[in-house]
Amino acid sequence: VARHFGADHHEFLVTPKASEIFPKLAWSYNEPFADASAIPTFYLAQVTRKHVTVALNGDGGDENLSGYDRYRAMVLADRFDGLPGVIRKGVHTLAGLIPEPVTFKSKLNRLKRFVSGLGKPAVRRYGQWVTHLDPEETERVCQGELLASYQKHAPFSLLGEAFHRSAAPDLPGRFQHVDFQTYLPDDLLVKVDIATMAYGLEARSPFLDHHVIEFCASLPTTMKLRGNQKKYVLRQAVQSLLPQEILNRSKMGFGVPMDHWLRTDLREMAYDLLLSDRAVQRGYFRKPVVQGWLDDHVKGERDRHERLWNLLMLELWHRAYIDGENWSRSS
């Protein structure tokens, strides 16, 4: 795209030395914030600030225009619910034969996660797709007051409340509303705002202009999600502006290879932090379960990087704000 428009393009390579920024992440977010894409976002903000003071981002494009695969999955799952019971039972039987994937983002894991949600209520299904741990697994790892608190509050209650407030006429539209009420303000916008402000950079989101949101909300889902093509109307609008290889490229996230890092450069740090006496004595999690996740991941038997990163950021936050470790903003 930069070559196509003759833009001044800069590249920055993020390496496992990103561990140096972990304390800064824990300090800056002021809460246990476990979106690993905060790492490249921090570095991007740092590099961008060297050139400009205001930058544009694409936040809101997926929520406005059905850009996530899970919206399409909701359509397919809803159709599955209308199939005869014997077919649904057969699909679930076959799903049980799918082996546990080694890689979290593999097609096999995506298939297994999709099938495991079939036949469940829409909110439970969606919640299972957008969280790193299902309720059963959460109850297996949590203990003490943390477990009691979790059990007291119905799983996915926030998603359910947002879902029932929506007046959208179909499931994709209702879950776009859910993301507007939860994922966007509680994760994506927090991530970018904190990262950019840490370096004195102002980030603006054109897709979240209220006129754009209102217009997109007025469109039928078929103008956003058509067959397998997401963001249909946006693709049509920019046909003459972008090269075809960009228009037809698969969606790319903004993550880092955390799964690889936790098996290599960050392995020792993960064991030291999560199995330390201090972490265990907090009484939040069952040590054998956490130990098992670490061992499985390091051996390459299962991809546990999502849940391990959650635990790492919680531990780092706890050390900064509850234990009172003296971390400066420049650490």
Image (cartoon, rainbow, N blue to C red):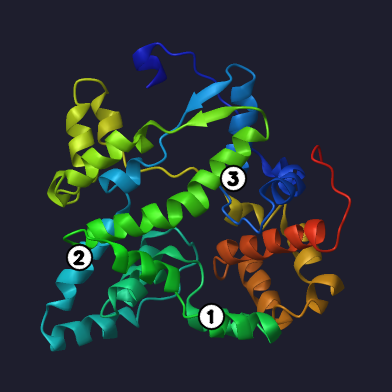
311 vs 14, nearest the viewer? 311
Q: Badge 3 is on which residue? A: 38
Q: Looking at the rendered structure, which numbered label has been put on residue 325? A: none
Report, in whole angstroms, how far the alpha carbon at label 1 lies from the one at label 2. 26 Å
Residue type, mark 1 in image: Glu
Residue at horizontal 70 percent and vertical 45 percent from the top:
28
Residue 255 visible here: no
Task: Please give left or right for residue 171 compared with residue 191 in the image.
Answer: left
Q: Residues within 10 Å of mark 2 (few under 14, many from 20)?
A: few
Q: What separation in Å lies between label 2 and label 3 (alpha carbons)? A: 31 Å
In the rendered view of the protein, which quadrant contains the C terminus? top right
Local secondary structure at mark 3: helix
Residue where numbered disc 1 is placed? 137
Tell me which label, 2 or 3, sits earlier in the chain: 3
Nearer-the-camera pick, 199 or 242: 199
What percent of the width, then of the height, locates residue 27?
74, 49
Q: Position of residue 203 (x, y in %)?
A: 52, 30
Left or right for 117, reference 78: right
Q: Identify the secondary structure beneath mark 2.
A: helix
